[in-house]
Image (cartoon, coloured by chain):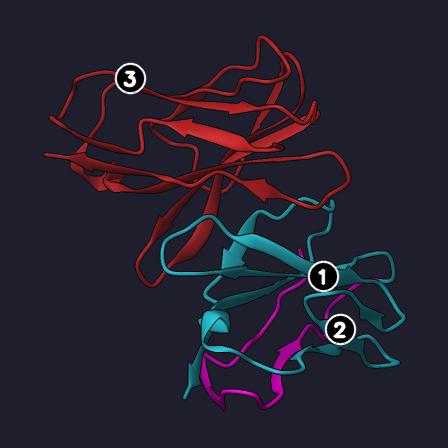
Chain colours: A cyan, B red
Amino acid sequence: DAKTTQPPSMDCAEGRAANLPCNHSTISGNEYVYWYRQIHSQGPQYIIHGLKNNETNEMASLIITEDRKSSTLILPHATLRDTAVYYCIAPASGYALNFGKGTSLLVTP
Amino acid sequence: EAQVTQNPRYLITVTGKKLTVTCSQNMNHEYMSWYRQDPGLGLRQIYYSMNVEVTDKGDVPEGYKVSRKEKRNFPLILESPSPNQTSLYFCASSSNRVLHFGDGTRLSIL
């Protein structure tokens, strides 16, 4: 798996966009970037994934730099329910071995 | 409803007493996996299975066994549990590399 680096924690005001960065400078050409989140101690929930192009779904947007060495997950209008740990992973085989420690996002009123 | 079901959700037991945590998925997924989550260490993979009768070690397989006799079930077996296996365990399944997780099993080994 490509090594990913995320800030341990971030804050965001409710209603504002939350931009969560991830560095994956060792990613290879065919490795996708996946984002999951985990609320409290629930099972992680899939958010979005991408290879080269930017992606958007009903939950979030994913911006991947042209050199693919980093990406940003964007929650356009964060709510209190978005408070969670967000994991960025780039598994070599497509199935993650480890999720790392992620970024703990706190959305404040 | 598509889901991954783990049982039990909580278990307190003693060292050396064999236990099995069951995992079942109703999505006909070929891939299944077990993870453990410990404070400060994130989620780490224990074992995974690419299909029936095909299993392989993940990052932290010591002390665990698995079996995959049928596609929907992937039980995690602790033959002789020890206190260092006290953890939160998650089962996951996938058909297209997107993982679907169960609600977790919190094991306490005394």
How many neighbours does mark 2 have within 10 angstroms: few (below 14), some (14-19), or many (20 or more)?
A: many
Pointer 3 and pointer 2 on the same chain: no
SS of the residue under disc 3 = loop
Label 3 vs label 2: CA separation? 43 Å
Tell me: B73 left or right of B17. right
- Identify the amino acid type marked 2: Leu
Residue that appears at 82% across and 75% down: A68
Q: In which quarter of the image is residue A37?
A: bottom right
Pointer 3 and pointer 1 on the same chain: no
- Residue wearing tag 1: A48
- Identify the amino acid type marked 3: Glu
- Identify the amino acid type marked 1: Ile
How many numbered marks have been drawn onto this rendered protein structure?
Answer: 3
Report the predominant secondary structure element of the magenta stretch.
Answer: loop
SS of the residue under disc 1 = strand
The residue stretch that appears in magenta? A1-28
Label 3 vs label 1: CA separation? 37 Å
Whether label 2 touches label 1, CB < 8 Å: yes
- Residue wearing tag 3: B79
Residue that appears at 67% across and 27% down: B27
- Residue wearing tag 2: A62
Q: Does residue A10 lie above or below B69 as drawn?
A: below
Residue that appears at 85% across and 73% down: A54
The picture places residue B16, in percent across and down from the top left corner, at 16, 20
Tell me: A82 left or right of B108. right
- Looking at this view, name the residue that lies furthest to the top: B69
